[in-house]
Amino acid sequence: MSRLFAKGFSTLTCIALVACAAPASRPSAAVGDVVALSGGPNTSMVYLGRVATGVVAIDLGWWGAERSFSRALRELRASPDDVTDVFLTHSHRDHIGAWRLVRRSRFHVAGAERAMLVGERRHGGWIPRVVERLKRSDLPRQAQVDVRTFSRDTSFVLGGDTLFAYVVPGHTPGSAAYLFRGTLFLGDAATYTRWSGFGPARRGFSDDPQAAARSLDALWARLPRATIRTVCTAHAKCSPLTPELLADIKR
Ligand SMILES: [Zn+2]
């Protein structure tokens, strides 16, 4: 079983007038799982897990993602062709960097995300729109990848494992969270800063920040909480699922 929660995380210093934020850890992995970190302004995390039927990936990183992804595959003694299924939390450019490397995999996204993943529709957040004008995202076209969609909370049986997908629209219309081997991958439905700790999706990057916050609120009641050890943002900030974390995110 994976253990993405690294010990020895840095604790934020709480000072007068500043609320104590839930501390974040860096992800780590155990046998059967690898976490790859890719570059960019904000580190983007790729998770790879070996299952009986091959390898599954959650998100595909950004700058240098193909290199870090390939290195992670070597750790699993796997090749890109072993990656059978890719689960994307959403289709912003900093989550899809290695798509060409695994283009023969099944790409799973929530239904409302498909058009944005294949370039048929633009993202709505003002920062992604401005960045898109400066440099277009490197997106797959419909004919280049096999995109499978889900329209509600869904479970996927992968060999002897089950991956649970949850729809959390708002950051993007088809944002999704995934629960696999005790880790909840929230994508950008939650964020983390040194100053305020964990919180809901960032405004400027989100299509509908209010909807994103509502989705996150509604998510907790649908989760099998007892099975969740760790919660991670897509930018490699992780924490145990504690009342402190939940209070922090809702702030
Ligand atoms: Zn995003």
Image: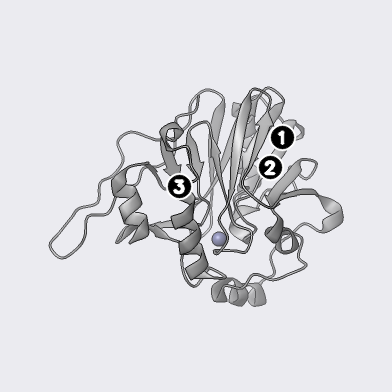
Q: Secondary structure at mark 3?
A: loop
Q: Nearer the viewer, mark 1 or mark 2?
A: 2
Q: Secondary structure at mark 1?
A: strand
Q: Nearer the viewer, mark 3 or mark 2?
A: 3
Residue furthest to the left in view is 16
Query: Could you say which disc has been placed on residue 221 in the image?
Result: 3
Q: Nearer the viewer, mark 3 or mark 1?
A: 3
56 in relation to 236, above or below = above
Q: Is residue 85 visible?
A: yes
Q: Residue at x 50, y 63 (%)?
A: 212
Q: Mark 3 or 2 closer to N-term? A: 2
Which is more toward the observer, 107 or 100?
A: 107
Q: Position of residue 1 (x, y in %)?
A: 50, 24
Which residue is denoted by mark 1 in the rendering? 83
230 in relation to 99, above or below = above
Distance from Cα at disc 3 to Cα at disc 2: 26 Å
| Quadrant of picture, ligand 1 | bottom right
Q: Position of residue 72 (x, y in %)?
A: 59, 34
Q: Is residue 193 visible?
A: no
Q: Secondary structure at mark 2?
A: strand
